[in-house]
Each structure stands twice: as structure tokens, then as C-alpha cells.
Amino acid sequence: MLPVYICEDDAMIRAAQKEYLRKQILMEGYDMEIALCSGHPEEIIRAVRESPGRGIYFLDIELKGEPMDGFGLGQEIRRLDSRGFLIYVTAFQDLAFETFRYHLEALDYIVKGNPRKMQEGIRHCLKVITERMRREEGEEREFFSVKVMDVVRHIPVDEIVFFETAGRTHRIELHAVNDRMDFIGSMQDLEEKFGKRFLRVHRAYLVNVEQIAQLDLKSREILMKNGEKCIFSRNMKGTLLERL
């Protein structure tokens, strides 16, 4: 999930950006979440440093009363996140050249004087980012799409470790390499969908064979590559040994 950061010194504009982003992410089911909305660049830098990874950054250029402007903040972000998406939301229309001077590779500039145009710009940027991420992932990589609450998540199948019945009727818990989520589903439907790549090792577990690290035959436990464990039924011992 891509984190979204907003740095804007005007509280009203900051709130408007946050609300519109929240609505767009919800309506379009983007695999994104608003991580931080602040008027202080140091808070943005600290948050990015504490949660390294690729992000989306909506930055004001003129940050009044702060030790750096949006270009300085963009430079600090680039040091921490070289592949992140920088979008400048500014009252100044003619500063595109400045980002070349600072080597910032901004995705876009959104003029914030007109609320409607600002919303159009935000909507366009989110669409472009989503399309670019899909191209980068490659057309051949398979994804499993699942609705979690009101958001549609797209999980690479090769990063799914196992599925587990969540203890409630029709609830499934998906364990991914670096994530976990609960959704409504059927273990039988999942078993049919994924075929031989996943094994129903127990009535409560459907595991990705490629994610298995080792078997403990005595305790009938499977150790997955991410360190998690699940049990397997006695009658699955032979099948597991054949597949590994």
C-alpha cells in the first residue's frame, strides 16, 4: 500500500486536500492510504525516515515560517525515497524549471487557487501513479484482488503466504509476506482459483507451496519463509513431501 504525505502550510487547503484524497482513494479503491498531513516539513521527513519505502508526496512550495521550502523538502525526500512521486500543489504556475534545477523529477504541478482545478489535478495524478505502478510491476505478474472494507487491494500472488479461516463464518485471513488482511470469502473458491500452486494442507489453511521453508513432521507444522507457522493434516504428509 502506497503511503500518501501532504505538506501544506494553509490549514484550510490542507484539510481540503486530505478530504478529497480520502474520497478518491475510497471511491476508486486505490491501494493507498494517507500516512501524514502536516504543515511542518520536519514531520514529513521524520515520518518518511521511520517508514522507508516508496510514497506519494503532495507538497506546497512556499512553507511560511518553516526552515525549508517545498523544494528543500523535495530534496530531503529524494534522499530517502528516490522512486517516490512528488507533486507540487502551489499558487505559483511558473516554477517547473526550479525542479529541474534541484533535480527533483516532479510528477506534476497543481495550482491550488481554483478548488475544482486542484481536485482535477489530484484525480489525474492518482490515476497516472496507479497506471505507472501497474506497468512497472509488469503485465505478466498475477495479482489477487480483494475488497477490504471499502478499499480494493491488489496483492501479488507470489507474495501471498497462506490463507486461514478467521474463525467467523465466511471470513478469510490473508497472510502476505509483509501484510495481513481479513475479507469475506470461501476457502473452497480460493482452492479452485489457485489450483496446484496452493495446497489445502488443513481445513483451516491454504498455503502457497513456493512460500514453504520447511516441514516439522513430528509436530505437523509448516514453517513459511516469512517465519509464520501453520499446521497440516496427517493425510497431507505424503503430498507435502512430494511437492517439496
Image (cartoon, rainbow, N blue to C red):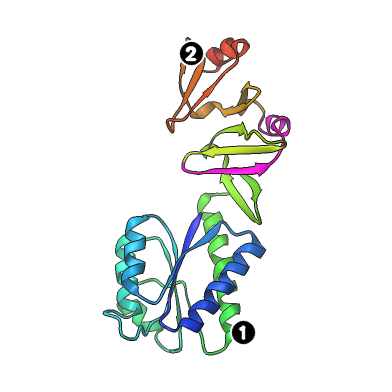
**Residue under label 2:** 219
Q: Residues within 10 Å of mark 2 (few under 14, many from 20)?
A: few
Amino acid type assigned to the residue bearing label 1 in the image? Arg
Residue 116: mark in rendering: 1
Q: Viewer-proximal residue, 66 or 125? A: 66
Within the image, what quadrant is residue 100 found in?
A: bottom left
Going by the image, does 96 lie left or right of 242? left
Residue 181 shows which numbered tag? none
- Look at label 2 and name its amino acid: Ser
Q: Nearer the viewer, residue 89 or 219?
A: 219
What's the magenta region? 178-194
Residue 79 locus on image (x, y percent): 29, 63
Q: Is residue 193 magenta?
A: yes
Which residue is painted at 65% across and 37% down in the image? 172
Residue 42 position, x and y percent, is 31, 70
Q: Quadrant of residue 198?
A: top right
